[in-house]
Amino acid sequence: MGKLYIGVDLGGTNIVAGVVNEAGEILCKKSVKTDLPQPEYVIEGKICNLCKELCAENGYKLGEDITSIGIGTPGNVNSETGVVGFNVNFGYIDWHLKEKVMEQIPGVEVYIENDANSAVIAEVIAGCAKGCEHAVILTLGTGVGAGVIVDGKVLDGYNQSAAEIGHMVISAGGRQCNCGRKGCFERYSSATALIQDTKEAMLANPDSKLWNVCPDIGRVNAKTVFDANELGDETAKQVIDKYIEYLACGIINVVNIFQPEVVCLGGGVSNQKEGLINPIKEYLDNEDYARHLMKRVTLKIATFRNDAGVIGAALLGVYNA
Amino acid sequence: MGKLYIGVDLGGTNIVAGVVNEAGEILCKKSVKTDLPQPEYVIEGKICNLCKELCAENGYKLGEDITSIGIGTPGNVNSETGVVGFNVNFGYIDWHLKEKVMEQIPGVEVYIENDANSAVIAEVIAGCAKGCEHAVILTLGTGVGAGVIVDGKVLDGYNQSAAEIGHMVISAGGRQCNCGRKGCFERYSSATALIQDTKEAMLANPDSKLWNVCPDIGRVNAKTVFDANELGDETAKQVIDKYIEYLACGIINVVNIFQPEVVCLGGGVSNQKEGLINPIKEYLDNEDYARHLMKRVTLKIATFRNDAGVIGAALLGVYNA
């Protein structure tokens, strides 16, 4: 048996913990409701009890079979000190999470990391960018989350808040973003944006097959438009073409800036796999500043899907080893 | 006397070499015409003779007083192997420049680096970003050149072609760029773009004081519009406001992506100093994703100006030490 690691995905709704091996496979997992709002010590207790119960129920000894716990959480995290600077869901400021968990579970190394950073770490340790010194993950979900590896290390910047690629403006003066800017990448390329585009197209085109796929406009999701496109619907095709044009624009920006070996796409929209990647590759072949070089970026679908949070957090133990 | 370094700025028109101290001060310099086209060995000979003559004429012994030669050049450079992959001005492919110079000048360490990367190295070694582990330089000239330091190291990516921030699209579908994309940052924020904007405003506004500042439209430069603004010209003000809006957009993208400690602005337009920086700071205070944090980016004018090429190349000897 190779080394084993616990990963904790600390979300606003659920806290999920899993035992993960070096290949990024989950051997067992367990979850508990976060049940916010709560003071810090309650959440610390939930995390620690969850890890202890997970091990007890599955016959692992903490500190022997498992020597590290990784925790992935939104917000800006100082991974060296293990302090969560600010986490908007929880409302805590300067939360000394690493220290608190180590107090309750002695003999185990604890790593804290931003969840988008954990996701890219998972991909370079055991996923589609395995072994890459330069890689980027873009997670197309509610927003566009991003994690970047430069020279084998997470890009976190001077203040542990770097890699907000979703808030890179690609269309100056364009769609209003929650962050205060206009024209941010995520306002065009998130699953949320795609759903919004789909709904607008439905309202403007009462004859579209989008209505056959999803008669209740309130239930449109990121898959709706791809399903209607399969039926040969022209409106759906136009929505997808426009969506991919913007997505490609942002991805090519990322490529021109980082020239990574791999860009991984995660999140709900990336379930479309080749249907998403192939047209973006065409844009890349025309616009990548390094398109004439032999060594070029490869675009891939992220390996780790629904459990990426737990796996990424667990593999912090490998990344930091 | 502290350590001394030779820096060579290898341009398409001139080759300039200087002896530089650790503070980035040029003690003496000498230049020669590049006189292209030339085969590789002629340029190699010119570089080596220039360094030898510079030392002989100024009483420095190569290999004793001076133990390193740094060379900055456009194009994609593998700084580890010292091979220039492709340099469009010279037309060479896979030019083993480091090896050739070391053959002709034994006993001296030779470093080759892309010139935009040398510029940011100069700033973090001895300039306005001294000591920073995370810094970006944007050079507003013919295009927008960029060099990035992440965790104390130059960002060069998987293929030594990263940091093409000038070719980040900020206005999708916008102005056509030479690179093939539409809406690139440098098409709005280079000195070239500002000159173009100024000329267009002059043609559209025959009564503008821009004409008093520069009666010959063919002689408009990046300073013209700022001079007319000083005279209270409304057209000039509009050109500057729009220019700064786009420049701020690109800079905030850079900040959201890298969260560096310092962003340095270089190139001709940056001669405007506070006139340029202060309005950009206002945008930053409204749009920087990390604007609520204590640790935030500082925007500065690059320390090294006309001689940045020579100084940056020389300080490769400090950076690589």
Image (cartoon, coloured by chain):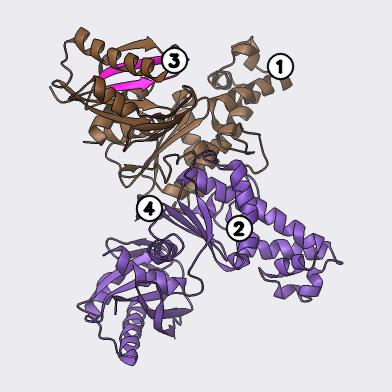
Chain colours: A purple, B brown
Crowding around mark 3 (Cα neighbors within 10 Å: few <14, some 14 to 19, many 20+) is: few
Tag 4 and tag 1, C-beta contact below 8 Å? no
Q: Quadrant of the C terminus of chain A?
A: bottom left
Secondary structure state at the residue bearing disc 1: loop
Residue B43 in the image, given as x and y percentages of width and height: 37, 17
Contact between marks 4 and 3 (CB within 8 A): the answer is no
Q: Which of the two discs, 4 and 2, labels the residue nearer the N terminus? A: 4
Q: Chain of mark 3?
A: B
The chain letter for the residue carrying disc 2 is A
Front residue (pair B243, B193):
B193
Question: Would you name the residue on which mark 1 appears?
Answer: B207
Residue assigned mark 2 = A277
Disc 4: which chain?
A
The alpha-carbon separation of the residues under discs 2 and 3 comes to 44 Å
* Front-most of residues B297 and A17: A17
Residue designated by label 4: A133
* Image depth: mark 3 or mark 1 in front: 3
Residue B87 in view, yes or no:
yes
Q: Amino acid at mark 4?
A: Glu
Q: Which mark is residue B38?
A: 3
Front position in the image: B8 or A201: B8
Q: Helix, strand, or loop for circle 3?
A: loop
